[in-house]
Image: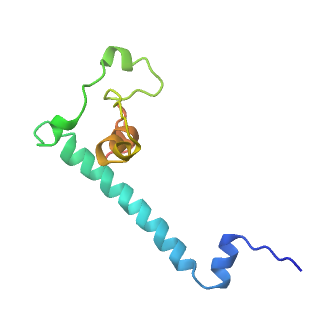
């Protein structure tokens, strides 16, 4: 008899449900801390990291777009650089009208 369990059912049977919840909580917390650091420490005009940001897009053009981005897109040559802090934050948190403020 071939019995197939889903991943969640296996976790419940093995009493490792807390492992899944803990992992999800850690990912949410990491996302929150990254976003908060980017908004508080990098976007600030007086920040020593502000010079790392690319040029801002023209607001006259971005106001007409559905999904405007504040900064110009970075040209990345390697996958390793694309996964670093600054390109990640510009892709995920670099919107003109952020839905939530931190």
Residue 46 position, x and y percent, is 10, 39
Q: Is residue 38 visible?
A: yes
Residue 63 placement: quadrant: top left
**Viewer-closest of 32 and 72:** 72
How many discs appear? Answer: 0
Left or right of 54 in this view: 25: right
Residue 84 percent location from the top left of the image:
33, 48
Residue located at (32% from left, 29% from top): 70
| Horizontal and vertical percent position of residue 14 | 63, 85
Q: Nearer the viewer, residue 87 or 69?
A: 87
**Quadrant of the rendering where the N terminus is positioned:** bottom right
The residue at the far right in this view is 1
- According to the image, what is the colour scheme of the structure? rainbow
Looking at this view, is 66 or 14 the one in front? 14
Q: Is residue 15 left or right of residue 81?
A: right
Residue at x 66% of width, y 72% of height: 8
Residue 8 horizontal side relative to residue 67, left or right: right
Q: Is residue 69 above or below residue 84?
A: above
Tell me if I can see residue 102 in this picture.
Answer: no
Residue at 33% across / 14% down in the picture?
60
Q: Is residue 99 above or below residue 72?
A: below
Which residue corresponds to the image point at 86% horizontal and 76% vertical from the top-left? Answer: 2
Quick one: which residue is furthest to the top in this view?
60
Please determine whether, in this image, residue 98 is positioned above or below residue 18: above
Residue 81 location (% of width, % of height):
34, 43
């Amino acid at each position: 008899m071939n019995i197939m369990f889903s991943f969640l059912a296996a976790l419940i049977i093995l009493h490792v449900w807390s492992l899944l919840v803990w992992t999800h909580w850690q990912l949410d917390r990491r996302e929150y801390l990254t976003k908060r650091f980017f908004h508080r420490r990098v976007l600030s005009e007086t920040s020593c990291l502000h010079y790392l940001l690319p040029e801002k897009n023209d607001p006259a053009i971005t106001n007409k777009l559905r999904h405007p981005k504040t900064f110009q897109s970075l040209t990345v040559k390697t996958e390793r650089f694309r996964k670093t802090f600054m390109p990640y934050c510009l892709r995920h948190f670099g919107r003109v009208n952020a839905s939530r403020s931190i």
